Image (cartoon, grey):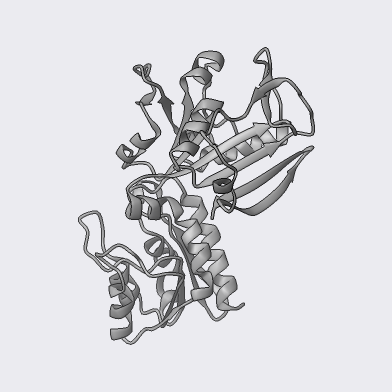
Amino acid sequence: MTDARWMAAALALAERGRARTMPNPNVGCVIVRDGKVVGRGWTQPGGRPHAEAMALAQAGEQAQGATAYVTLEPCAHQSPRGPCCTDQLMVAGVARVVGAMIDPDPRTSGDGYARLKAAGIEVHLLASATPAARRSLAGWLMQLERGRPLVTLKLATSLDGCIALANGESQWITGEQARAHAHVERARHDAILVGRGTFVADQPRLDVRLPGLEDRSPRRLLLSSTAAPDGWHGLTEPEAIVTLNDVQYLLVEGGAQAAAAFLRAGLVDRLLLYRAPILIGRGKACLGDLGLTSLVPTHGQWQHVDTRTLGIDTLDVYERA
């Protein structure tokens, strides 16, 4: 296999830690010797052990002379929570380290690769994997660079953009497979938010109801000018997400006014648009007023990155351009 394919395997492992590794990034690592995987790891819940430590423990003596594929530059700073990965790779005797990107954290940035090179270990930065690595680490990078979570807005609508009948009935617009996928997305987020209207109308549980993933239900947030009930964390405005320094990935699930508020604030980074093959006509729109007076600023804001068929429904994924 090529470097690119081994790195793809490391990136797949990194996804296992998404929304579980705060305050650390969700990193993946694969250790390869003589064309075979001898160790693999991903950042564990709570941020430790790191991916490299887990993979090296699995590889044991077989790490000697092997190649380590890591989705982020190995950390080079000492921490009271555990040893730095650069030291561990050197002690293990790996011959080569292939990384997907430089760690933007100033405590490591470039030092990890430099120390490995100084120890006689071949280092290769696989630039072609950097975009995928940044997408994999998007929530951690958003906190590091902008001090807020990465925000995903989920909309489940009819073909004509409605989220409910005029009388409020909304169960169910999308089918079983689309709803199951939405629960997978919940499991990939630290926190989930709805507005006061949705809370009052639906009394949503906002948990993950898929076998084996129940323990990954996100923290529940309520966008409201009044106090949040027990078991919920209140935010009075979208801009208050800067206070969520323990959240990397935030999912906004509803309703129309909460969605519009986040869009007006320019705080949506990713769109999940589930569409069912039904027409409602005079129903409830999926979005409230965005305050637009011209169509000019609406163009060029979003780029389409994925389409999936989920049973009879379609999912389109957009990222902010």
219 is higher (above) or lower (below) than 75: above
41 is higher (above) or lower (below) than 47: below
- Residue at image x 57%, y 43%? 271
- Residue at image x 67%, y 12%? 167
The residue sitting at the bottom extreme is 120
Residue 123 in the image: x percent, y percent?
40, 81
Residue 142 in the image: x percent, y percent?
39, 52
Residue 183 in the image: x percent, y percent?
59, 35
Quarter of the image where one finds residue 171 = top right
Viewer can see residue 26: yes
Answer left or right for 224 relative to 32. left
- Residue at image x 55%, y 81%? 34
Residue 265 in the image: x percent, y percent?
43, 38
Indicate the quadrant containing the C terminus: top left, top right, bottom left or bottom right.
bottom right
Pick whichever, 234 or 125, lies toward us: 234
62 is higher (above) or lower (below) than 241: below
Indicate the quadrant containing the N terminus: top left, top right, bottom left or bottom right.
bottom right
Pick whichever, 273 or 56, lies toward us: 273
- Residue at image x 30%, y 69%? 109
Pick whichever, 138 or 257, lies toward us: 257
Pick whichever, 236 or 39, lies toward us: 236
Viewer can see residue 48: no
Answer left or right for 87 relative to 218. left
